[in-house]
């Protein structure tokens, strides 16, 4: 075990306390960084299978892609002209004297270059998680989420998604009912209970 492995694991737990910057304009409960990483990892895994990519590499890249925000924080587009961050330095310091250092920094470098299929999938998943969360927030009437869905996100679909699978998933998200999964399970349960009487 490396000197800072345990400290690193405690720091990773603190990501559940790091808010995403866009909570400033969205009125519903917004995911924290840990929640974002979890769901976007599942999205990326789904895309990786469809695109026949290296799933192992995709999952590692997902887990690492926003860890620097533990120290550098998250910023939204409106902050970028005013805030200077050094997320690269934050990541280097986070992984110092850990067992993961060399592999983690290599995987993150690949992600930032966006040249490999795996890096493109991870960025696609990062974007798609935004669209799913906006859909959830729009369901509760968040006017900023509704506006972003209409005015900004179609540009992301057209210009920033890399893979065919991600573009198809984006289209399906727009049509989806974010509560359908729950209603379907409830209906099955109620039907099963009625049948048992």
Image (spheres, helix red, strand yellow):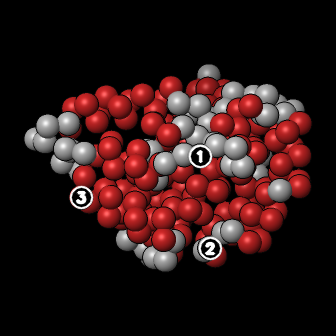
The quarter of the image holding the N terminus is top left
Identify the mark nearer the N-term, 2 or 1.
Answer: 1
Q: Residue at x 89, y 55 (%)?
A: 151
Mark 1 burial class by Cα count in 10 Å: few <14, some 14-19, many 20+:
few
Secondary structure beneath label 3: helix
Res 170 visible = yes
Q: Quadrant of the C terminus?
A: top right
Going 73% across and 55% down the picture, which residue do you hit? 173
> Is 19 situated left or right of 51 in this image?
right
Q: Is residue 102 left or right of residue 196?
A: left
Circle 2 or circle 3, nearest the eye: 3
Hey, which quadrant is residue 118 in on the image? Answer: bottom left
Q: Which residue is mark 1?
A: 84
Marks 2/1: CA–CA distance = 28 Å
Give x and y (percent) for residue 74: 58, 40
Which is more N-terminal, label 3 or label 1? 1
Q: Which mark is residue 162?
A: 2
Label 2 and label 3: CA atoms lie apart by 27 Å
Judge the density around disc 2: few (<14), some (14-19), many (≥20) Cα neighbours within 10 Å.
Answer: some
Name the foreground residue: 59 vs 20: 20
Residue at numbered disc 3? 102
Q: Earlier in the sequence, mark 2 or mark 3?
A: 3
Q: Nearer the viewer, mark 1 or mark 3?
A: 1
């Amino acid at each position: 075990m490396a000197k800072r492995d345990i400290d690193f694991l405690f720091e990773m737990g603190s990501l559940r306390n790091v808010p995403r910057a866009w909570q400033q304009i969205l009125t519903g409960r917004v995911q924290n960084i840990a929640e974002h990483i979890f769901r976007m990892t599942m999205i990326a895994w789904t895309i990786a299978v469809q695109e026949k990519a290296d799933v192992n590499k995709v999952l590692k890249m997902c887990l690492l892609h926003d860890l620097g925000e533990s120290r550098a924080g998250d910023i939204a587009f409106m902050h970028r002209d005013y805030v200077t961050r050094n997320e690269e330095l934050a990541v280097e310091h986070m992984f110092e004297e850990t067992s993961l250092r060399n592999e983690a920094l290599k995987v993150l470098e690949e992600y930032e270059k966006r040249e490999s299929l795996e890096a493109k999938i991870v960025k696609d998943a990062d974007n798609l998680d935004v669209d799913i969360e906006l859909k959830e927030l729009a369901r509760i009437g968040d006017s900023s989420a509704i506006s972003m869905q209409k005015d900004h996100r179609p540009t992301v679909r057209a210009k920033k998604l890399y893979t065919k699978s991600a573009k198809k998933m984006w289209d399906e998200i727009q049509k989806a009912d974010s509560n359908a999964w729950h209603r379907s399970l409830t209906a099955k349960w109620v039907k099963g209970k009625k049948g048992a009487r």
